[in-house]
Amino acid sequence: MRDSPIREVALLLVAVMCLGACSSSAHNVLFDLDGTWRGQIKGFQAPGLVQKTMDYDLWLTIRNDKVDLWYLWEGHWVRLWNGAREFTIVRHKSNAVIFASNSKPQTECHWVETWSLTVSQFRPDWLETFWYRVVNNTGCPEYDDVQFAYGAAGQLHRISPEATVPRQ
């Protein structure tokens, strides 16, 4: 019997969380995720994900429990949901899961979207990054894609130990 796509993605996330935690040579410097991180993630195909892949240039800032995410769109940095939703970060040593959800309040159309990043700090200034975007437009006839998900992976590099805002 084949596992569901959601179960396969969940198992992948658990495996990624183990990558950094399994290293016996990790130093405390690998537990410092605070700062500004920038890099590119490239879309990939997997069960349950749409066939169209999305590549993103990301700008991620982490300071304690405060996280902001920007992506480059048509030459301009765009803050995800214009900062309307706060990200939650769950840390474990060199790894973290970062996520936020948003929705559109309507009576007949229920749009819900979640962005999640699973990161592992392989080196002091390098985050291996797995990104997922899951959207559910239940009861929204104006949308072609009712439910869909994207996935991407890549590396983000620390460009500053402080949390900074991208310049346009």
Image (cartoon, rainbow, N blue to C red):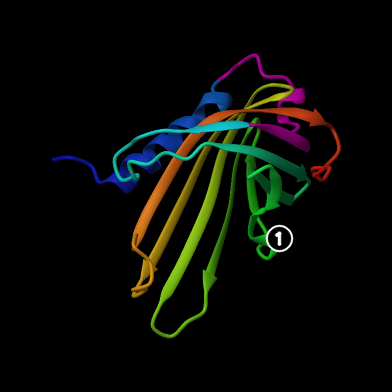
For this view, does 106 lie left or right of residue 90? left
- Furthest-left residue in view? 1
The quadrant the C terminus occupies is: top right
In the depicted view, which residue is nearer to us: 98 or 113?
113
Q: Looking at the rendering, which quadrant does residue 14 occupy?
A: top left
The residue at the far top in this view is 25
Please give the range of residues in magenta.
Answer: 23-39
Query: What residue is drawn where x is 38% and y is 72%?
Result: 142
Identity of the residue drawn at 79% across and 43% down: 166
Above or below 158: residue 74: below
Residue 73 picture location, percent across and down: 63, 46
Mark 1 sits on what residue? 83
In magenta segment, residue 80: no
Mark 1 residue type: Gly
Q: Position of residue 78 (x, y in %)?
A: 68, 51
| In this picture, residue 55 sits left or right of residue 64 | left
Q: Which residue lies at the image location 40% right of the left edge and 77% below the top edge?
A: 109
> Is 30 one of the magenta-colored residues?
yes
- Image position, residue 94 (x, y; %): 65, 30
Residue at the (71%, 60%) spot, across then down: 83
Q: Is the residue 114 above or below the residue 150 in the image?
A: below
- Count all numbered tags in the image, as a single digit: 1
State the residue in front, 35 or 153: 153
Q: Quadrant of the N terminus?
A: top left
